[in-house]
Structures are given as C-alpha cells and as structure tokens.
Amino acid sequence: MPKETGRKLIAQNKKARHDYHIEDVYEAGLVLTGTEVKSLRAGRASLVDAYGRIKDGEVWLEGVHIPEYDQASWTNHEPRRSRKLLLHRDEIAKLIGKTKESGLTLVPLSLYFKDGKAKVELALARGRRAYDKRQVMAARDAAREIDRAVGRRAKGRV
C-alpha cells in the first residue's frame, strides 16, 4: 500500500479567526486511540468548543468532539475526552510563558492529516471585542470594494 502524502483537512474552526486576533500558529501532533483515527479518517470531527490548555508542563486539547466509530465494539472512545498534544519542549516553554503573561489563549484552527499523521494547527490568540470585530469587517469590506472598483476600471467600465 502506498504511503499517504499531502494534507487532508478534517475540520476547521472558521469562527476562531473572527473571534480572535491570531498572534502565532503552531503545528502539533495528537495522541489518539485507534477508533479516534478511524473516525477522523471518515472526516468526522468538530472544533466548535475546543481550546488548548497547559497542565503540568504538557499541552492538552479540550472540547474537541470526535464521534464514536460506528463499526467499533466495546473498544470505542469517549467523544469529548482530553487529548494530549505533541510539541517540542522549547515550543511548550514558549507557550507557557506567553499564556501566563497576558490575555493570550490557545485556540485550535484546524484538524488535518499530514503525511498520514493527525495534526492540529494551534494558534496563540488574543480575544477580540465587539468593536474590534466591526472594525475588521469594515476594513475587509472597504478593501473588497476598492478591488472591485480597480477591476471595473481596468476593464474600462468605470
């Protein structure tokens, strides 16, 4: 059987980029059981209420919903259990320092397979307030309108 290559997206937290200002992004491996991997390969997972937590010098992923695998029997997993993340020691030390100093939190952005291994894209993020969200949306809409105007001008439709 050929070795799996490339990146296959399983789940994405689209609301995270809206609700948080992303400071830094890390890629981490996941410690999973067999039925969790089979359920992920079927493309079933949800990052809606997920967050990262540092406990005893280790990084844990909380609140990720990986539904039970249908064909499994008594060996099935718990859908919302805590899952350990695999990061380098210096990355963990950096995360510990940043999350303790100021209102930064760990938010998972996406869950995917990379070369056959389950990975999570973890962001060090700062929460946005309502007026920040409105400003970002207004700036995005203005940039989009400018691009449309430039496109019309280039086509000669003024």
Image: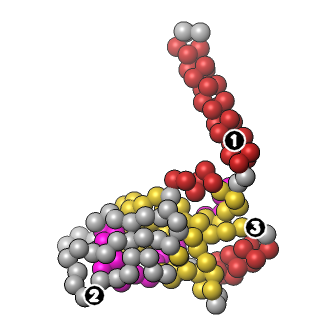
Which numbered tag is attached to residue 56? none
Q: Amino acid at mark 3?
A: Gly
Q: Nearer the viewer, residue 1 or 36?
A: 36
Q: Position of residue 13 (x, y in %)?
A: 50, 58
Which one is earlier in the sequence, the residue at label 2 or at label 3? 2
Q: Earlier in the sequence, mark 1 or mark 2?
A: 2
Distance from disc 2 to disc 3, alpha carbons, whole Å, reads 39 Å
Using the image as rendered, state which of residue 123 and residue 70 is in the foreground.
70
Question: Does 132 appear above or below 86?
Answer: above
- Crowd rating for badge 3 (residues with CA inside 10 Å; few <14, some 14–19, many 20+): few
Label 1, label 3: how far apart the Cα atoms are? 21 Å
User: Residue at image x 62%, y 69%?
Assistant: 106
Find disc 3 in the rendering and name its residue. 103
The quadrant in which residue 16 appears is: bottom right
Q: Secondary structure at mark 3?
A: loop
Name which residue type carries label 2.
Thr
Residue drawn at (59%, 53%), measured in percent from left and top? 17
Q: Position of residue 136 (x, y in %)?
A: 68, 42
Residue at the far right in the pictured view: 101
Q: Which residues are magenta?
A: 21-41
Q: In what element is the residue under mark 1?
A: helix
- Residue that numbered label 1 is attached to: 134
Which residue, given by chain and number where applicable, does mark 2 sit on?
75
